[in-house]
Amino acid sequence: DAKTTQPPSMDCAEGRAANLPCNHSTISGNEYVYWYRQIHSQGPQYIIHGLKNNETNEMASLIITEDRKSSTLILPHATLRDTVVYYCIVTRPYPKKGGGTSYGKLTFGQGTILTVHP
Amino acid sequence: DARVTQTPRDKVTEMGQEVTMRCQPILGHNTVFWYRQTMMQGLELLAYFRNRAPLDDSGMPKDRFSAEMPDATLATLKIQPSEPRDSAVYFCASAPDGVYEQYFGPGTRLTVT
């Protein structure tokens, strides 16, 4: 699975958009980009994932560059509760569509600690 | 609101003792993962099962760790004998077939003295 690089920490003002970058320059064609978040002392929580196209759900938006070598997680209106660790992960799809045993494993890096300021 | 449950939530034991951690995946989820989190190593995948069969346990120290799924509602992670370096938070996660997100439990905080 491709390796990801994230800044160790970022700051954001409450109510503003938080843009969390992730570099994955060695990503291969069938690898997805996942984002998880982890509140201290709790299990990670899935946020969003994507392959090529930009994705949006009720939690966030994911912007993937055309060459797929980097992506940005966007929290449109950051709140104080968003002050947690965010992980960007690249892995093969799980499970493999059409059958087979290509299961994607989540390899967590150190993540980005986002601090939202009042 | 279906959730992954893990027991015990906290465990303190002495070096050399056997430790068993349990996980109840979300009903209907056929894939179960075990992770370990420490300050030094971060979150590491230890093993995972699909339809109760082990698919990959390459992240797990084989000499002292074992993971099983006796039935679809229970996954266990056992350490025998435990060592201080096993002190960590152990997370279980489950996922249904065809879905990309994993649902994590609250974790078991293990302290080996």
Image: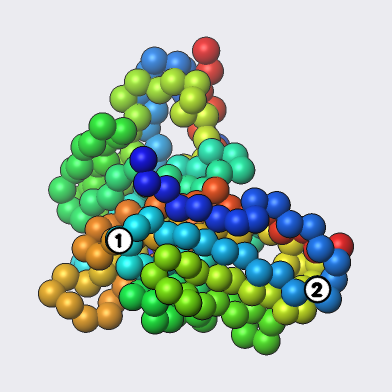
| Tag 2: amino acid | Gln
The quarter of the picture where residue A60 lies is top left
Mark 2 chain: B
Check the image and report above or below for B85 versus A7: below
Check the image and report above or below for B29 versus B76: above
Where is the C terminus of chain B found, in terms of image quarters?
Answer: bottom right
Closer-to-camera residue (A79/B36): B36
Q: Indicate left or right for B34 with B85 as reference.
A: left
| Tag 1: amino acid | Gly
Kindly identify the residue that appears in the image at 69 percent across and 82 percent down. Answer: B64
Residue B112 in the image: state x and y as whole percent.
80, 63
* Residue A25 in view of the camera: no
Q: Earlier in the sequence, mark 1 or mark 2?
A: 2
Q: Say which element carries label 1.
A: loop
Check the image and report above or below for A54 versus B14: above
Kindly identify the residue that appears in the image at 36 percent across and 68 percent down. Answer: B31
Q: Which residue is mark 1?
A: B28
Closer-to-camera residue (B54/B42): B54
Closer-to-camera residue (A79/A25): A79
* Residue A118 in view of the camera: yes
Q: Indicate left or right for B77 with A61 as reference.
A: right
Residue A71 in the image: state x and y as whole percent.
31, 46
- What label does residue B17 carry, if any? 2
Residue A117 in the image: state x and y as whole percent.
53, 18
Mark 2 Cα shell of 10 Å, populated few (<14), some (14-19), many (≥20) = few
Mark 1 chain: B
Q: Say which element carries label 2.
A: loop
Where is the N terminus of chain B found, in terms of image quarters?
Answer: top left
Mark 1 Cα shell of 10 Å, populated few (<14), some (14-19), many (≥20) = few
